């Protein structure tokens, strides 16, 4: 069990009447994702113990089994969302296989702890004043580092520096409205097309063999059609017209919609902290391409990435994507590309 895409890509705004509107596809500027990961991994480390013989494990096992047996079926998924029969089957299966379930949970939790340890030792330790990898400001995520840890198995722990980011590469959660299905994704514009969904899933799941192509294809198609949330407050029409004129004259050249544009027309050196744009190097781009193609061979229609491939080596042109400003009111930055070293 883990988080879903919407945990980072759903924001919210309080309207004039006091009600709260969810902003599907926007940026969750409030989520303390790394605090959550840090706390849940440390809690599970204690609850699961080192083996099934540990007293903490036995107490945790009893607590879960008691919870599974003491609730009505509708409690688990919400009344009406899953049939009582299916819920009962799920509960019975989990109860009958509780030790296998918890053993897998221990394995996955140890993998997350190893991921945290590698990033702290090889990336975060290099910055004089690094942010906390298991805490820090809300609205920031370490996607590059979490994804790159999966490449260490190709080079070995002794060469982890060759594929891990050269420093902390936390960045703001981006909005995912109107994703160009064949274009470039992420702040550095290194991921193309369907690879956007696959690499995001890989950072969460950890095991490339567990990636569901069909589900990811549906997500990619959904995001390509998802419109930005409209501004919900009164608009001064005269000010809007002035702003539109200024935008067309001074901003549209960089912030136009990305469909059909080359990477060199989207990525700029904007003079902010370079650590995020340096997170992917030539070696890690090549290895990540290998992993993506192992999940999604070009023989499948949605995996036809073109001559550039699914991952672009950014070393020839580094910088940050000047994305479209649709829905910009809902994605105010938390601390984009913060200069941690200062």
Image: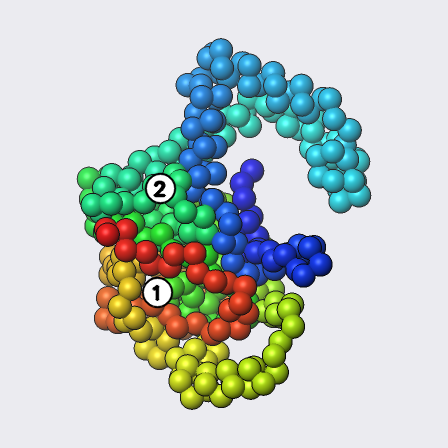
Tell whether label 2 touches label 1 (CB within 8 Å). no
Identify the mark at residue 327; answer none if there is no mark.
none
Q: Quadrant of the N terminus?
A: top right
Task: Work out whether residue 236 or residue 177 is closer to the camera in this orientation and state it.
Answer: 236
Asked if residue 230 lies left or right of residue 291, the reply is: right
Res 51 quadrant in image: top left
> Is residue 70 rendered to the left or right of residue 259?
right
Q: Dot 2: few (<14), some (14–19), or many (≥20) neighbours within 10 Å?
A: many
In the image, residue 107 sits, relative to residue 35, either above or below, namely: above
Query: What secondary structure is marked by label 2?
Result: loop
Occupied quadrant, residue 255 = bottom left
In the displayed structure, would residue 224 be above or below residue 292? Answer: below
Q: Residue at x 39, y 43 (%)?
A: 136
Along the polypeptide, which appears first: circle 1 or circle 2?
2
Mark 1 sits on what residue? 188
**Looking at the image, which residue is at 70% across and 34% down?**
76
- Label 1, label 2: how far apart the Cα atoms are: 21 Å
Q: Which residue is mark 2?
A: 133
User: Residue 140 appears at what percent x and percent y?
Assistant: 42, 51
Residue toward you, 269 or 241: 241
Query: Callout 1: helix, strand or loop?
Result: loop
Specify few, some or many for label 1: CA neighbours under 10 Å numbering under 14, 14-19, or 20 or more.
Answer: many
* Residue in the picture at 34% in, 68% down: 320
């Amino acid at each position: 069990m883990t988080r879903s895409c919407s945990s980072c890509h759903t924001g919210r705004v309080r309207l004039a009447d006091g009600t709260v509107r969810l902003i599907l596809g926007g940026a969750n500027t409030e989520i303390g994702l790394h605090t959550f990961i840090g706390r849940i991994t440390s809690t599970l480390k204690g609850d699961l113990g080192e083996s099934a013989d540990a007293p903490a494990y036995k107490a945790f096992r009893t607590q879960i089994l008691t919870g599974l047996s003491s609730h009505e079926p509708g409690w688990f998924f919400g009344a009406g969302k899953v049939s009582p029969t299916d819920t009962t089957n799920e509960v019975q299966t989990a109860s009958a296989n509780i030790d296998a379930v918890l053993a897998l949970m221990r394995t996955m939790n140890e993998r997350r702890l190893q991921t945290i340890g590698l990033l702290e030792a090889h990336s975060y330790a290099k910055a004089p004043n690094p942010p906390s990898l298991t805490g820090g400001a809300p609205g920031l995520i370490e996607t590059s580092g979490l994804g790159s840890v999966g490449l260490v198995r190709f080079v070995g722990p002794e060469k982890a520096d060759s594929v891990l980011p050269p420093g902390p590469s936390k960045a703001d959660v981006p909005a995912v409205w109107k994703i160009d299905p064949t274009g470039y994704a992420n702040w550095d514009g290194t991921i193309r097309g369907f690879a956007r969904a696959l690499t995001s899933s890989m950072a969460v799941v950890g095991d490339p063999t567990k990636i569901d192509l069909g589900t990811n294809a549906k997500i990619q198609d959904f995001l390509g059609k998802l419109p930005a949330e409209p501004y919900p407050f009164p608009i001064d029409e005269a000010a809007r017209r002035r702003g539109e004129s200024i935008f067309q004259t001074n901003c549209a050249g960089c912030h136009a919609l990305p469909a059909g544009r080359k990477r060199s027309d989207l990525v700029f050196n904007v003079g902010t902290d370079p650590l995020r744009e340096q997170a992917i190097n030539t070696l890690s781009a090549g290895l990540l391409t290998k992993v993506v193609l192992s999940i999604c061979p070009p023989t499948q229609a949605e995996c036809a990435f073109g001559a550039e491939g699914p991952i672009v080596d950014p070393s020839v042109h580094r910088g940050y994507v000047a994305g479209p400003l649709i829905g910009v009111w809902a994605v105010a930055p938390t601390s984009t590309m913060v200069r941690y070293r200062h």
